[in-house]
Amino acid sequence: MTDKTELGNIIRSQIKTKALFNQVRSYAFDYMDTIHDRPVFPSPDTLEKLSVFDEPLPDKMGDPEKFLTLLHEYGSPATVAQTGNRYFGFVNGGVTPAAVAAKWLSDVWDQNAGLFVISPIAAHLEAICEKWLVDLFELPENTKAGFVSGTSTATLCGLAAARNFLLKRAGWDVHKKGVFNAPKIKVVLGEEAHSTVFKALSLLGFGLDDLIRVKTDREGRMIASKMPDLDETCLVIAQAGNVNTGAFDPFHEICDKAKKAGAWVHIDGAFGLWAKGSGSKKHLAAGIENADSWSVDAHKTLNAPYDCGIVLCKDESALVSALQNTAAYIQYSKNRDSMLYTTEMSRRARSVELWATLKFFGRKGIETLVDGLCENARLFARELKENGFHILNEIDFNQVLVTCDTESLTQAVLTEIQSSGICWCGGSVWKETSVIRISVCSWATTPDDVHMSVKAFIDARKRALSKQSKKESK
Ligand SMILES: *Cc1c(COP(=O)(O)O)cnc(C)c1O
């Protein structure tokens, strides 16, 4: 048994010597220095070795020096190299040293960003990020931001604000009366809305069978002329950046219709809202400023560290009325009290690294970043096409959908790529066709990485074809 004094002494001496921090600092630097040479996805052998962590909850206190070594020896190799230069899976993003360093400092601060009185610095940096983002996205003045884990939660918050606002206007107080007997809200969204939108709607009491799904075009854009007649009971959900094609809904048309009818518009702009940061791409997001609420991720296109999503809402009172809670011990201040804008009460101070990311890039850097992702996506598509692959989408942004000559070959090539270690792409289904989905999301990707990855595609196809022909000859 360790007694109380001994426990305190052990921890105090760890703070005093800094040995653990120096130890992991060298591991972290080692990881950064070798990221380009690591397999992008860990080998089966590495994954098998994760069993070194398997044990029942230990009785005795552990020796951090030993278990931090374990973490580096077995944990680091079992990461995906998504901070490297050839990770194209899902829609992720890279990180910058400036932001990670700021995050390290904020890790040491260990702030709870719930209220101004719990963390003035977190609240202050949130207020600054809010102003910068509203400016960058060209949103209405006084738009409020809540800083959450990601777009899933941001969308939940935005749609909660919308639901409560629309019902309040219809004379129904959701707080008091709940949702089950409430007047009907008609939810209108594109067939191609992201899965997290459906999750948020279902959490908020909307039935999925009840949604009005609007036809989309070949790129997955909502066809505005196919929208039903809207009225003041409608909640319209549009999308900036389709998760497969990267396509953007026609916001001007959608918002014009919605505004005339008094409907609420929410835009899921997880990765696409950042188009606003580029002079040559912002036309894609034109008209988003006419919506009422938005959700966006900083951990995608902006390359901020995980996790960092933002809900933005034009009507502060709608957001606050949906998300506030009260208790005798909560001490609100005249300053920004962040828990009014998010689902959580306690929350880490992610505004620190978001601020550092925005401050590092600045407008110019964001533009260069966004343009670079789009250029590399176009290069990818061009080189793949030249090498006999098929590209299924228009490359307006950072997404590329690839197929081979047959469905089975596409799937076999995907498997080969995922185990190649050279790059990593995910799969998806687009218009009932299996596709390999490339998402260029990191500042770290260079044209050389694209060449190397295209070569990995060609080699993967060779291996897949030779396996197929072996199977057939058996
Ligand atoms: C990634 C994504 C989401 C979900 O965001 P998380 O940060 O993973 O919660 C929602 N919508 C779109 C379009 C996305 O690309």
Image (spheres, grey):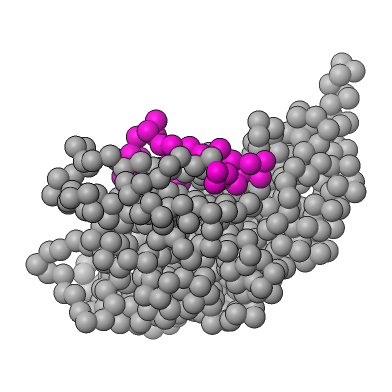
Does residue 102 show up magenta in the picture?
no
- Residue 276: x and y, percent? 58, 69
For image coordinates 32% across by 46% down, the residue present is 233
Question: Is residue 223 or residue 65 the one in the foreground?
Answer: 223
For image coordinates 36% across by 75% down, the residue present is 142
Does residue 198 show up magenta in the picture?
yes
217 left or right of 380?
left
191 left or right of 412?
left
- Residue 266: x and y, percent? 43, 55
- Residue 373: x and y, percent? 70, 64
Q: Quadrant of residue 419?
A: top right
359 left or right of 443?
left
Quarter of the image that includes the C terminus: top right
Q: Quadrant of residue 359?
A: bottom right
Segment colored magenta: 196-225
Q: From this viewpoint, which residue is outermost toward the left?
A: 328
Q: Quadrant of residue 177?
A: top left
Quarter of the image that includes the N terminus: bottom left
For image coordinates 81% across by 58% down, the residue present is 379
178 left or right of 266?
left
- Residue 119: x and y, percent? 30, 78
